[in-house]
Every structure is written in structure tokens, then in C-alpha cells.
Image (cartoon, helix red, strand yellow):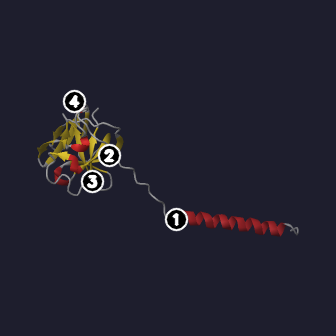
């Protein structure tokens, strides 16, 4: 071995050792899981009252249909502002109300007027040409609205649920 080869070999071993330690430490570091951002809270104004009524000053009316302990909550109000895409699983949440499970407290779903509930062997909801069974995956656009803004919401629907309901955008 030549006289200059030993220091180079030591330097190479030191570099490899440092790289191995860095890799080992990075593999042991706790990985942070990024939580999805909740949909934005947007004000709602009925289309026919857009100039006369502000959603900030009044409640958001909802209607309910119940079948075999499952409660469907709907609204005829079309929300202004942008909706956000959401994904999760359609579940029966607090009070028997249909909700979205996103690995946290279930978020109450408020579906468009005209949505139909079928509580047969495989409970499901249908609006337009979309049918989703309870327990099935759900991907749609919605706007988050604080639970205290709803008028006509059955007792129990908001208990233990997320602080905001997801109002599904029609279409």
C-alpha cells in the first residue's frame, strides 16, 4: 500500500460510517403524518333570497327523513362559495344520522334536497345518478358549516360528531 492510500482509505471509511449513521437515524425518526385540512367554512344564502338574507344572521333550514333508525338530513339551500373535495366512508353517526367517517369524529352529512334514503338490507342514499351504500367509500364536494347554524336538526345528530356538518354540493 502506498503512503497516501491509508489516509484516503480512512477518510472513505469515515465518510461511509457517517452516511450509515445518518441513514440509520433517519429511518428511526418518527414520521409525521399530515392531517387533511377540513373543508372551508363558507356562508350559505338561498338562491331566491341572495340579496335579502345573509346566512350569518339566520339559521340554515334542514329537513329529515328517517327509516329503520337511519336519519337522512337534507337542505334545499345552495351554498355560496367554494366547496372542497372530501373522501371517507358513509356511516350511521350520532343519533342515527348519516355521516362521513374520516378517521375522527364523524361529520354529519347534509345532502341535497331530493336525496332518497333506502334502509333495506343494504341501507343507501341516492341523489341524481349516484347511489352510495352505508359502509361504502364516499368521494364528493362539500362545504363545512358549524352545527349550531342548522334549524330542524334532530336531537342527537350533532352529539359526539365533528363540530361542523358537511353540506354536499348538488350536482
User: Would you call the spot at circle 4 few (<14 residues within 10 Å), some (14-19), or many (20 or more)?
Assistant: few
Q: Indicate whether 7 appears above or below 93.
A: below
Spatial CA span between label 4 and label 3: 28 Å
Residue 41 is marked as: 2
Alpha carbons under labels 3 and 2: distance apart: 11 Å
For label 2, the crowd category at 10 Å Cα-Cα, with few meaning under 14, some 14 to 19 and many 20 or more, is some
Q: Upstream in the sequence, badge 4 or badge 3? A: 4
* Residue drawn at 20 percent across, 38 percent down: 75
**Residue density around tag 1, few if under 14, some if 14–19, many if 20 or more, within 10 Å:** few
Quadrant position of residue 119:
top left
How many numbered discs sit on the rendered protein?
Answer: 4
In this rendering, the label closer to the viewer, 1 or 4? 4
| Residue 3 percent coordinates (x, y) | 88, 69
Alpha-carbon span between mark 1 and mark 4: 55 Å
What label sits on residue 29 in the rendered view? 1
- Residue drawn at (69%, 64%) of the image: 16
- The secondary element bearing badge 4 is classed as helix
Say the numbered circle drawn on residue 48: 4
Amino acid at each position: 500500500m502506498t503512503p497516501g492510500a491509508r489516509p484516503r482509505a480512512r477518510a472513505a471509511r469515515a465518510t461511509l460510517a457517517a452516511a450509515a449513521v445518518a441513514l440509520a437515524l433517519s429511518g428511526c425518526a418518527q414520521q409525521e403524518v399530515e392531517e387533511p385540512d377540513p373543508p372551508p367554512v363558507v356562508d350559505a344564502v338561498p338562491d331566491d333570497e341572495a340579496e335579502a338574507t345573509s346566512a350569518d344572521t339566520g339559521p340554515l333550514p334542514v329537513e329529515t327523513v328517517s327509516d329503520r333508525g337511519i336519519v337522512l338530513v337534507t337542505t334545499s339551500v345552495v351554498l355560496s362559495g367554494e366547496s372542497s373535495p372530501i373522501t371517507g366512508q358513509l356511516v350511521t353517526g350520532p343519533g342515527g344520522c348519516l355521516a362521513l367517517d374520516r378517521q375522527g369524529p364523524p361529520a354529519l352529512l347534509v345532502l341535497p334536497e331530493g336525496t332518497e334514503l333506502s334502509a333495506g338490507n343494504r341501507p343507501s342514499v341516492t341523489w341524481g345518478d349516484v347511489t352510495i351504500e352505508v359502509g361504502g367509500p364516499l368521494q364528493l364536494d362539500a362545504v363545512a358549516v358549524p352545527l349550531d347554524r342548522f334549524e330542524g336538526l334532530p336531537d342527537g345528530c350533532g352529539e359526539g360528531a365533528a363540530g361542523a356538518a358537511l353540506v354536499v354540493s348538488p350536482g
